[in-house]
Image (tube, coloured by chain):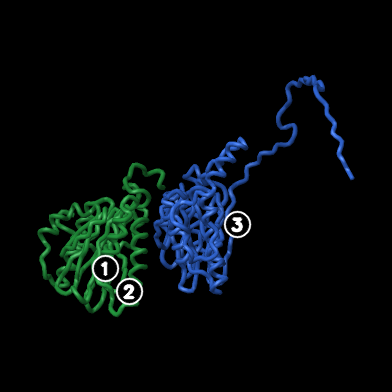
Amino acid sequence: MALSSVLQSPAPGFNFDNAARNAALGRNDGGHTPKPLKTGTTIAGSGFQGEWWADKACAKIHYISPNIYCCGAGTAADTEKTTDLLSSNLTIFSLNSGRNPRVVMAANILQDMLYRYRGQIGANLILGGVDCTGNHLYKVGPYGSVDKTAYLSMGSGDLAALGILEDGFKPDLEMEQAKDLVRAAIQAGIMSDLGSGNNIDICVITRDGVDYIRPYQESETIKYKYRPGTTRVLTEKVVPLKLEVVHESVKKMVTG
Amino acid sequence: MERRCTGSEVKGVSTGTTILAAIYDGGVVIGSDSRASIGGEYVSSKTINKVIQVHDRIFCCMSGSLADAQAVTKAAKFQLSFHRFMERPPLVIAAATIMKELCYKNKEDLQAGFITAGWDHRHGPQVYVVSLGGMLVSQPVTIGGSGSTYIYGYVDAKYKPNMSREECLQFATNALALAMGRDNVSGGVAHLAVISETGVEHVVVPGNKLPRFNHE
């Protein structure tokens, strides 16, 4: 799967090189294949005057390149690996060409990769960044469909967030207004969706650089530690365990 | 969102669309709506672009699975770009045949249909339909997508050969408006492209500016 060049397309079809190895691991180790972890997420992105930013709760905003970041909803492993692969590919491009990648390149690479896997990679991605042609926001679906918009939300809390975005979005938002809009949208996702919760992270990307605010807003912390004596002890009973030595073996270490 | 919408024939985002193309005297009008949906329940985009320019004077309209349609038009655009090494631009039938080959050879895996329309130096304005299984047919006027079922009567009654450019544009706009008014998975804005020997003109009609009919 490792590509030495961005432009080299991998062999068609699925790559089953590791299938025999995985089966053998399962048998010998008594190990089990890891269960896919679903993120249960709300992610949203919005453009404002000249730049764009994304924000997200419950999962990371992934670094793609100095001017492009990506939010992922869906299967956590898939979003993690897909964005990592994309970032590596675009780093190779940057090294080869000496330029920052364009957002449309990232969207196309993602589209090609996800389409090739026919929806088996459960990655819903919001891709955004600023390049020499301006600010761009793309939505990439797990089957490989791409949509370019001014604002969008994805994840299990997307409908709640979309309501806020639809109501509040205007084409000429200032940065602070845009940040507040997306914060409110994510908040709606946190409140209305059982799968979303906790903190809000925001990433603001402008021509001058990236401001990754982690966290932008924290949920109220719930304390789980209680001081000794909080619960009154009514009775106490001590039962010593009878142990007998069944077998003892000493092995001397051979040195020198 | 996708796991909430099950039981749809199209996996993922569907264009669930109304697309059409019609030849007029001197050119061709191609148009579509702009709605993308999931499972027939959720509008995932109000502003999706389904009219793709694959060459200077050749456009394609997509229907069916958005991912499949985007992949096919990308591949077709790539293959057509090699015509830059020829003396003249590609014929419309060349573009339509590329789409047909892709659809026919991969018919088990793809769920996408297309209308290809354009102008070339040899045959003037043409419209081709590439259906789901990869059948290629040339027609003077054609409609496609889920919304097309509601406007067959209108198109059969109102289309005349050798219309003027304005008449044809009005005919296409009306047809799209009628389909978008009845089909739940068609909507948004009407994207139209008018292609002739002299050039290409994009016309976008927002939803609230679409023609309204008596009963609305």
- Circle 1 is placed at which residue position? B94
Q: Do the residues under discs 1 and 2 have CB atoms within 8 angstroms? A: yes
Residue A174 can be seen in this image: no
State whether discs 1 and 2 lie on one chain: yes
Marks 1 and 2, how far apart in space? 10 Å
Residue B205 percent location from the top left of the image: 26, 65
Q: Residues within 10 Å of mark 1 (few under 14, many from 20)?
A: few
**Colour used to depict chain A in the structure image:** blue
Q: Which mark is residue A40?
A: none
Q: Nearer the viewer, residue B32 or B42?
A: B32
Which residue is depicted at the point 16% across and 71% down? B166
Q: Residues within 10 Å of mark 2 (few under 14, many from 20)?
A: some
Which mark is first along the chain, 2 or 1? Answer: 2
- What type is the residue that disc 1 sits on? Ala
Q: Which residue is mark 2?
A: B83
- Badge 2: chain ID: B
